[in-house]
Image: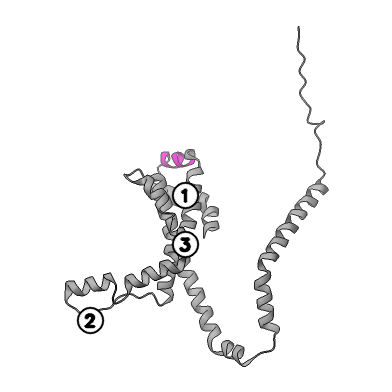
Amino acid sequence: MAIETSVPSTKDAPKTSPRLSRLSLRAGDGFALLAALLILLPTLVAALAGLFAPVSEAWQHILTQSLARYALGTVSVMAVTGVLVLLAGVATAWFVTVSRFYGRAVFEWALVLPLALPGYVIAYAYADLFSVAGPLQSGLRDLTGWSARDYWFPTLDNPIGAGFVLGAALFPYVYLTARAAFLTQSVCAIEAARSLGAGPGRTFWRIVLPAARPAIAAGL
């Protein structure tokens, strides 16, 4: 007994109107724009209130004396934090992904632990560690016999110090996204690059890193 099978023709498949596709895309864009506006609404209200509200003496003082300095300090802290987060997150993600060493399984989850602590708690810990009465400087004075005025020691009350503390607290964001990107990359492309004579460093910079760049940017 012969069994007849019918293969549906592509002509019978329902066709989506290009106009309908454009309408769906526009609707999705509209929802995304609405969500973005809702998120930005408090910032927009604060900015508009500051621009169009009557200028008081306090606000005039901030504009003329403090605003530029505060803005420059904020941008400086963001720049230092971004560089440190990028370097630490990508380096640690690549290290635990491609390396095989004792304790690797511990490092995989231990590198996420800074997210469990608020940034101000880490700041207090580092401030105590780097202070004059902290263990680092106390140990240095005990070893050398110096006084606190005989040497220079880095402090955290500057954009570099604040960026270091924030980088230590926030680098797991880049670590998680970069590691996920490294794990999902095709091994074939890496093996092809190695078979063509590319060393580990060149393979990382030319093959692995460009493919993981969107994930790294999202974490950053």
* Residues tagged 3 and 1 counted as in contact (Cβ below 8 A): no
Q: Is residue 164 visible?
A: no
Front residue of 87 and 53: 53
Q: Which residue is mark 3?
A: 170
Q: Main secondary structure of the magenta part?
A: helix
Left or right of 33 in this view: 188: left
At horizontal 28% and vertical 78% (from top left) the residue drawn is 152
Q: Label 1 amino acid?
A: Arg
Element under disc 2: loop
Left or right of 50 in this view: 108: left
The residue range painted magenta reads 189-195
User: CA–CA distance between discs 2 and 3?
Assistant: 34 Å
At horizontal 70% and vertical 84% (from top left) the residue drawn is 52
Magenta stretch holds residue 141 = no
Front residue of 45 and 152: 45
Q: Label 2 amino acid?
A: Asp
Instruction: Please identify, in this view, whether the residue under mark 3 or under mark 1 is nearer the observer.
Output: 3
Q: Is residue 43 visible?
A: yes
- Of the two numbered discs 2 and 3 on the same chain, state the one appearing first in sequence: 2
Q: Which residue is mark 2?
A: 150
Element under disc 3: helix
At horizontal 41% and vertical 48% (from top left) the residue drawn is 108
Q: Label 3 amino acid?
A: Leu
